[in-house]
Image: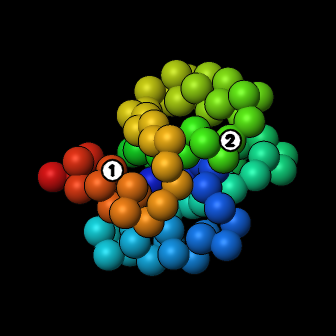
């Protein structure tokens, strides 16, 4: 399963990837909007940490997810335990 994580803390990127590896998922993490979301591929799940994301990035993510028909999990917190809870919910 592939997961794209949008937002979160830059210092937690490695931790997010390690957590996804524990659940046997491939992960791409975008803590900032650098060049848009052109190279996200076709993920199975998009995790959106809404507390650390700009409104512009939210709109970009939602339109991209609509085009790709991808599940979106929104969470206000960008903690490691929040990501674990999301992965437990969606990977069953």
Real-space CA distance between mark 1 and mark 2, rounded to the nearest whole angstrom:
18 Å
Residue 75, given in percent of the width and then of the height, sits at: 45, 41
Work out whether residue 46 or residue 7 is closer to the camera in this orientation and state it. 7
- Please name the residue shown 39% across and 34% down the image: 71
Across the whole image, how many numbered discs are drawn on residues? 2
- Counting other residues with Cα less than 10 Å from the Cα at mark 2, is it few (<14), some (14-19), or many (20 or more)? some
6 sits to left or right of 91: right
Mark 2 secondary-structure assignment: loop
Residue 92, given in percent of the width and then of the height, sits at: 15, 52
Residue 62, given in percent of the width and then of the height, sits at: 58, 26
- For marks 1 and 2, the one nearer the N-term is 2
- Please name the residue shown 67% across and 24% down the image: 59
The colour scheme is: rainbow
- Please name the residue shown 49% across and 49% down the image: 77
**Which residue position is annotated with label 1?**
86
91 sits to left or right of 38: left
**Which image quadrant is residue 64 in?**
top right
Residue 41 in view? no
Residue 73, given in percent of the width and then of the height, sits at: 41, 38
Work out whether residue 65 or residue 88 is closer to the camera in this orientation and state it. 88
45 sits to left or right of 86: right
84 sits to left or right of 6: left
Do labels 1 and 2 touch, CB within 8 Å?
Answer: no
- Counting other residues with Cα less than 10 Å from the Cα at mark 1, is it few (<14), some (14-19), or many (20 or more)? some
Mark 1 secondary-structure assignment: helix
Give the number of the disc on residue 40.
Answer: none
Residue 67 in view? yes
**Which residue position is annotated with label 2?**
53
Q: Quadrant of the N terminus?
A: bottom left
On screen, 49 above or below 13? above
- Please name the residue shown 45% across and 77% down the image: 18
């Amino acid at each position: 399963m592939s997961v794209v994580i949008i937002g979160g803390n830059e210092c937690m990127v490695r931790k997010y990837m390690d957590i996804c590896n524990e659940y046997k998922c491939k992960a791409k993490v975008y803590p900032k909007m650098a060049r848009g979301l052109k190279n996200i591929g076709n993920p199975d799940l998009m995790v959106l940490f809404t507390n650390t994301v700009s409104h512009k990035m939210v709109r970009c993510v939602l339109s991209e997810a609509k085009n790709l028909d991808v599940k979106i999990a929104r969470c206000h917190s960008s903690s490691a335990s929040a990501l674990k809870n999301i992965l437990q919910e969606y990977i069953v």
